[in-house]
Amino acid sequence: MDLLSFIHWSIDPEIFSLGPLSVRWYGLMFALSFILGYNMVEKMFKYEKENLKWLDSLLMYIVIATIVGARLGHVFFYAWDYYSQNPIEILMVWKGGLASHGGALAIFIALLIHSKIFTKKNVFWTIDRVIIPTALAAMFIRLGNLFNSEIYGIETSLPWGFIFERNGETVAKHPTQLYEAFAYFVTFILLRRAYWKTEIKSKTGMLTGFLFIMVFTARFFIEFIKEDQEAFEAGMMLNMGQWLSIPFVLFGLGLVLFAHFRYNKQKNKK
């Protein structure tokens, strides 16, 4: 197929710079995720007449957990051989290297602590509300990856293939960032509708379970057409992203079943 039939991608990841400081598309997407997420959770809290004073601490916990968890996830799951020899570079987040699985685990731990200190509620009550904008945030982060020309797929002949020219690519590759972004956006729409239009929010943990199932199932299958992120993944039957996704999917399934039976048990007692 003629190379002109494909999408030539050479967008500068930097929007503008002010001296030594620069504003990048990835950072903008990251910030937008937290701003929109805060507004969405605030709307839910107002609807349920919950304490709005919890929101600021909740945002702080999530921001710190996302950055620290995603960074350590990349360090330990994908590049420990390198960072064990260069430990100071673990702190250099601006150089890139974040793993969503590590971020998800860290957010869970952070919200567990937050629930114990502030809300005094079941941790999944909090996560069920945070998880909806989290799906949207995942979409924005993958769009940020697109602007960075990173985490893309293997060669393709499909007409929507991207030639990532800033990386020196001369053949079209699957824009797996867009595939994942679309999957996460659909997840966001379905979970948001479920929260506002059904009684699922009364089934503590079920929204969280469905997000884990949908997001990490999508991630598992898209990984089949994604280039390896690290050299050690070459020749593996399943790559690291897939191995890490499996327990999240299983956890999601277990959570949905547990939430369903727990809700029915409580309902029968009334």
Image (cartoon, rainbow, N blue to C red):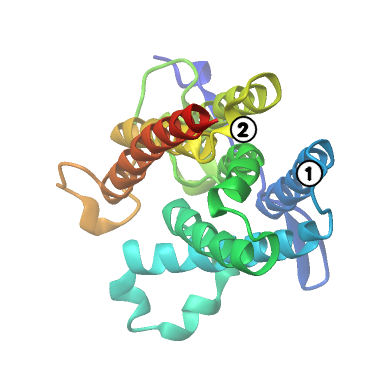
- The 10 Å Cα crowd at callout 2, few under 14, some 14 to 19, many 20 or more, is some
Whether residues under marks 2 and 1 lie with C-beta atoms below 8 angstroms apart, the answer is no
Of the pair 65 and 193, the residue shown nearer to us = 193
Q: Amino acid at mark 2?
A: Lys
Q: Is residue 68 left or right of residue 253?
A: right
Q: Position of residue 264 (x, y in %)?
A: 45, 28
Estimate the spatial distance between the alpha carbons at disc 2 and disc 1, rounded to whole Å.
12 Å
According to the picture, the residue beneath numbered tag 2 turns out to be 201
Compared with 228, 87 (above or below) is below
Residue at coordinates 77% horizontally, 38% vertically from top-left?
Answer: 44
Provide the secondary structure element on which disc 1 rests: helix
Q: Amino acid at mark 1?
A: Phe
Is any atom of residue 154 visible in this view?
no
Provide the secondary structure element on which disc 2 rests: helix
Is any atom of residue 165 visible in this view?
yes
Rendered-image quadrant of the N terminus: top left
Q: Position of residue 169 (x, y in %)?
A: 43, 40
Residue at coordinates 71% horizontally, 60% vertically from top-left?
Answer: 58
Q: Is residue 154 left or right of residue 57?
A: left
Quarter of the image for residue 141 reads top right
Of the pair 240 and 211, the residue shown nearer to us = 211
Label drawn at residue 45:
1
Q: Position of residue 14 (x, y in %)?
A: 71, 53
Query: In the image as oriented, which residue stretches furthest toward the front?
Result: 270
Residue at coordinates 64% horizontally, 61% vertically from top-left?
Answer: 120
Compared with 92, 131 (above or below) is above
Residue at coordinates 72% horizontally, 59% vertically from top-left?
Answer: 59
Label whose residue precedes the other's in the sequence (2 or 1): 1
Label drawn at residue 90:
none
Q: Position of residue 80 (x, y in %)?
A: 32, 72
- The 10 Å Cα crowd at callout 1, few under 14, some 14 to 19, many 20 or more, is some
